[in-house]
Image (cartoon, rainbow, N blue to C red):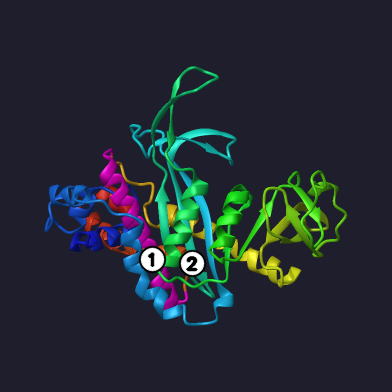
Amino acid sequence: MTKLLPLHDLYSDYLIVNQGAATAVGLSAMLEGQVSHDAITRCLHQDDYGSAQLWQVVKPLIREIDQKDTNDAFLIFDDTLDERPCLQTNPIVRYHYDHCQGRSVQGINQLNALYHCQSVSLPVAYEVIHKDRPVVDAKTGKIRYVSKYSKHQLLRQMVRQCLTNGLIFKYVLADKWYACADTFACLHQLECQFIMPIKANRLISVGPQPPAVGEHRPISELVIEPYQTLVVWLKGVDFPLTLVKQVLKDGDSTSEVRYLVSNDLRADAHTLSTAYGHRWQVEQLHKSTKSNTGYGQSPAHRLRSQKTHIFLAMLAYVKLESVKLATHQNHFALKKLLALDALKVAYRRWQDMKTMLSPSLKAA
């Protein structure tokens, strides 16, 4: 197992207090030259760091909290895309489809597994998507790059690893993009309960018994009251699921109709709806890592140094989460305090510098 180096601790601290681009030169300057920027660069290139090393960091923190009621513990999955248009392409800097923009953008795509229990949210695994296999696009005839493993496959691998690590949780949560039959079958075989939304065009059959051929119909044709539970059979899934219809409102108008499915046949609509509401915590992880840990602020071009920077940004998030629990202030409040302290120091330094101004400018 690769061990963390002292410079990794320094670098992750630097990512928290830094307000701009995260560079080896900047860290060296912050340390007043006690460590050269070449030494920092070599440290970022030294070895491969990733999900296994992150688990070694968070495991002691997890062990402190997972002895509590596991009904409040969730394993949440989602991917995030950090746009990097100026970086040279490599296996992790590729074009990925951005659902927010409705187009493909160049950047780094990362699948995260977040453990959320009560007020604690800790990343316990992650995978940076590697697109290193060239294929010829059938439509354009151009070469594009694809990954050896799909994100669905990576999610299933990560769940297996979390179970191997002894992680205890009530439900696996993910959005509708991950709600495929193969993933449902895998989680059910692993005896993991899950809650995921599915699209309204998915085919189901209502009833406690497996349906005959041709009995499936789209969910959108189903007459079901909001927050009513039904036992259904989803096409391609050979075990029954609980279905709940959620009607989300924006004021007095309906903003979204969501269909949740779960292999927990004993849970009621309130339990499933409330539990699935915790999926939003993974969005907070994405927002905080991008805003507070310098995730996308590294100008590094080499693959290994980019991956090490990502790992240390995740480590910086874990540090912020630990301090949050001690201070009861969220990541953004902590970052604001650090920025304010830096501003105060800069202001005092400037007041000293103003003594060198010309008399006319001092008067102004």
Q: Which one is in front, 192 or 291?
A: 192
Name the N-terminal-most of marks 1 and 2.
Answer: 2
Position in image of residue 228 (x %, y %): 82, 65
For mark 1, give the secondary structure: helix
Magenta residue check for 304: yes
Amino acid carrying label 1: it is Val
Residue 256 location (% of width, % of height): 75, 52
Queried whether the magenta region covers residue 78, the answer comes back as: no
For the residues marked 1 and 2, what is the alpha-carbon distance in whole angstroms?
12 Å
Q: Is residue 26 above or below residue 171?
A: above
Relative to 36, say whether 107 is above or below: above
Q: Quadrant of residue 90?
A: top left
- Residue 315 visible in the displayed image: yes
Q: Residue furthest right?
A: 223
Q: Position of residue 2 (x, y in %)?
A: 23, 59
User: How many discs appear?
Assistant: 2
Region in magenta: 301-328
SS for tag 2? strand
Near-viewer residue (201 or 250): 201
Name the kind of residue labelled 2 in the image. Answer: Tyr
Q: Which mark, residue 115?
A: 2
